[in-house]
Image (cartoon, grey):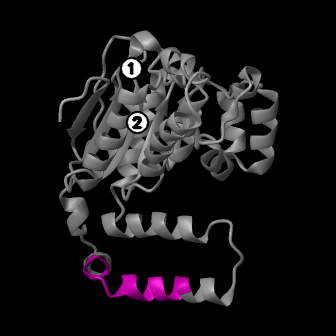
Amino acid sequence: MNYHTLLVESRNGVGIVWMSRADRGNALDETMVAELTAAMRALDDDSAVRAVVLAGAGDTFCAGADRDWLQHMTDNSFKRNHADAMKLTTLLDTVYTLKKPTIARVHGPVLNDGVGLVAACDMAVASYEAEFGLSEVRAGVIPAVIMPYLIRAMGERASRHYCLSAERLTAAEAYRTGLVTDIAPPDELDVRINELLGQLFQGAPSAQAQVKDWIRAASGVPITPYLRDGGAKRHATACTSEEAREGLGALLVRRKPAWLRKTKKSVPAKKTAAKGKRKP
């Protein structure tokens, strides 16, 4: 598929989605939202892809919603604004429910809906200079679409603090609250992501998809007999899968499982001289 707002690469088992509107701070518009949704679904369906990295070209990860898009919101009908919001929530849910592990490669400013993209990924590695802003209340609107993902990433207390105050978060604060899962110096950002990808590739693909599904199902609910029974049933089902037979068999005879033998030793690390551009 040809994209107008993205550059999508796939190599060594990694799908890399570059938001490629650097001149607009990779701000989201209708086209980018649709293309991001399509690209994520395509990579999820690609059996050669083990993990997906979401990145931003240029000096900004994502500046939130495009100004031209924002300009029309107050003139739009409820129906039109609702339809636009549903497209964004479909994108976030697509990222959040992807069967494969997702990593946000975060650098520079990250604003509003861009913060939602970070929160929807399984993991996020941020450069020390990254800065996060949730400034919607200062414009009289609310981050309602991204809020479910923020709460799951940051917790309710931190979400209240930053969504109400609109105070900026440094990379260190984002790490402390759980919005990002790791931080690194700018020149080591891709090294850390590649190390993380190497760890992810050790795991079995179907098992990772099941882990993600069960975490979503078990999060924020009471540990009832029904939930415990559900966990036991999932465990029993996984133990009799072909993947478990391969993995446990490999462990017992001390050989690499099939999914690891198919993976190259090195994970992608494409370096360029342009600051903040296409490195993983």
Seen from the viewer's position, the closer of residues 97 and 250 is 97
Q: Which amino acid type corresponds to the residue marked 2 in the rendered image?
A: Leu
**How would you classify the magenta stretch by its main secondary structure?**
helix
Q: Quadrant of residue 130?
A: top right
Q: Up-down: is 164 above or below 227?
A: above
Mark 2 sits on what residue?
54
Q: Magenta stretch? A: 230-245
From the top left corner, tell me how far across and down residue 6 is, in percent: 31, 27
Seen from the viewer's position, the closer of residues 195 and 146 is 146
What residue appears at the point 81 percent right and 47 percent down from the top-left corner?
157
Q: Up-down: is 245 above or below 94?
A: below
Residues at marks 1 and 2, CA–CA distance in whole angstroms: 10 Å
From the top left corner, tell me how far across and down residue 202 is, in percent: 35, 59
Tag 1, which secondary structure? loop
Disc ID at residue 235: none
Q: Up-down: is 265 above or below 250?
A: above
From the top left corner, tell me how far across and down residue 152 is, in percent: 64, 52
Q: Which amino acid type corresponds to the residue marked 1 in the rendered image?
A: Ala
Mark 1 sits on what residue?
57
Question: Which quadrant of the rendered structure holds the N terminus?
Answer: top left
What residue appears at the point 21 percent right and 52 percent down from the top-left corner?
46
Q: Quadrant of residue 5?
A: top left
Residue 280 appears in the figure: no
Question: Which quadrant of the rendered structure holds the C terminus?
Answer: top left
What residue appears at the point 28 percent right and 44 percent down from the top-left corner?
14
